[in-house]
C-alpha cells in the first residue's frame, strides 16, 4: 500500500540541503533572527498545520520567533523517510516523517530555488 519513494541520485544533495533548512523552521537555533526566517520564506508562504488549520506567513514567523526565544537544546526531533523531487523548474517537493517524542507527523513542503537561495512556499503537517 505504501508508495516506494526513493530520491534519485540527481536530487540527493538538494534533499539534504532542504532537510537542513526544514530543521531551522521546526526548531530555530538560538541567535536566529526574524530577518533570517523571513528570507527563508516566500512572501506568499502559508502552512496547513497538523491541526488542519491554515496559517499565514506572518503567524508562522511569529511562532518561530517565539521558539527561538524559548529554545530548548535538549529537545530532540528526528526525521526519516525523506524524499525529494523536482515538480517544476526550480520547484521541489520535500516529504518526510518527523518524530517529536511520541508525536509523529508526515510533512510536505514546496521549496523554490532562486539564484543564491532557497525559499519555502508551502508546508503541511499531518499527524500519523
Image (tube, rainbow, N blue to C red):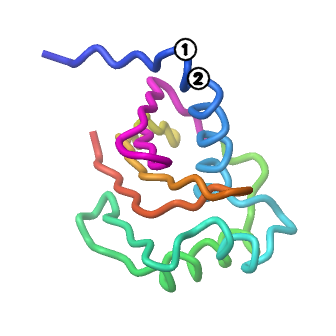
Residue 42 or residue 105, whichever sits in front = 42
| Disc 2 + disc 1, Cβ < 8 Å | yes
At horizontal 57% and vertical 69% (from top left) the residue drawn is 41
At horizontal 20% and vertical 18% (from top left) the residue drawn is 2
SS of the residue under disc 2: helix
Tag on residue 12?
2
Eyeballing the image, is 63 above or below 104?
A: below
Q: Is residue 106 rendered magenta in the image?
A: no
Tag on residue 106?
none
The main secondary structure of the magenta stretch is strand
Q: Position of residue 63 (x, y in %)?
A: 56, 76
Which quadrant is the C terminus positioned in?
top left
Q: Position of residue 15 (x, y in %)?
A: 57, 32
Report the side of 9 relative to 44 (left or right).
right
Q: Residue furthest left?
A: 1
Write the start and end of the magenta stretch as one range: 77-94
Report the side of 115 relative to 30 (left or right).
left
State the residue position of label 1. Answer: 9
Eyeballing the image, is 98 above or below 11?
A: below
Which quadrant is the N terminus positioned in?
top left
Gap between marks 2 and 1, in whole Å?
Answer: 5 Å
Report the side of 29 relative to 26 (left or right).
right
At horizontal 58% and vertical 52% (from top left) the residue drawn is 113
At horizontal 50% and vertical 48% (from top left) the residue drawn is 90
Q: Position of residue 112 (x, y in %)?
A: 51, 55
Q: Residues within 10 Å of mark 2 (few under 14, many from 20)?
A: some
Q: Residue furthest right?
A: 31
Dividing the picture into quarters, in which one does residue 64 lie? Answer: bottom right
Q: Is residue 88 rendered magenta in the image?
A: yes
Amino acid at each position: 500500500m505504501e508508495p516506494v519513494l526513493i530520491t534519485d541520485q540527481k536530487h540527493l544533495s538538494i534533499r539534504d540541503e532542504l532537510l537542513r533548512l526544514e530543521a531551522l523552521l521546526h526548531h530555530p537555533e538560538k541567535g536566529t533572527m526574524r530577518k533570517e526566517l523571513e528570507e527563508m520564506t516566500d512572501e506568499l508562504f502559508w502552512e496547513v498545520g497538523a491541526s488542519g488549520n491554515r496559517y499565514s506567513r506572518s503567524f508562522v514567523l511569529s511562532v518561530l520567533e517565539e521558539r527561538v526565544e524559548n529554545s530548548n537544546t535538549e529537545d530532540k526531533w528526528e526525521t526519516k523517510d525523506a524524499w525529494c523531487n523536482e515538480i517544476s523548474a526550480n520547484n521541489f517537493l520535500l516529504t518526510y516523517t518527523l518524530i517529536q517524542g511520541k508525536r509523529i507527523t508526515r510533512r510536505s513542503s514546496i521549496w523554490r530555488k532562486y539564484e543564491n537561495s532557497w525559499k519555502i512556499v508551502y508546508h503541511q503537517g499531518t499527524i500519523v
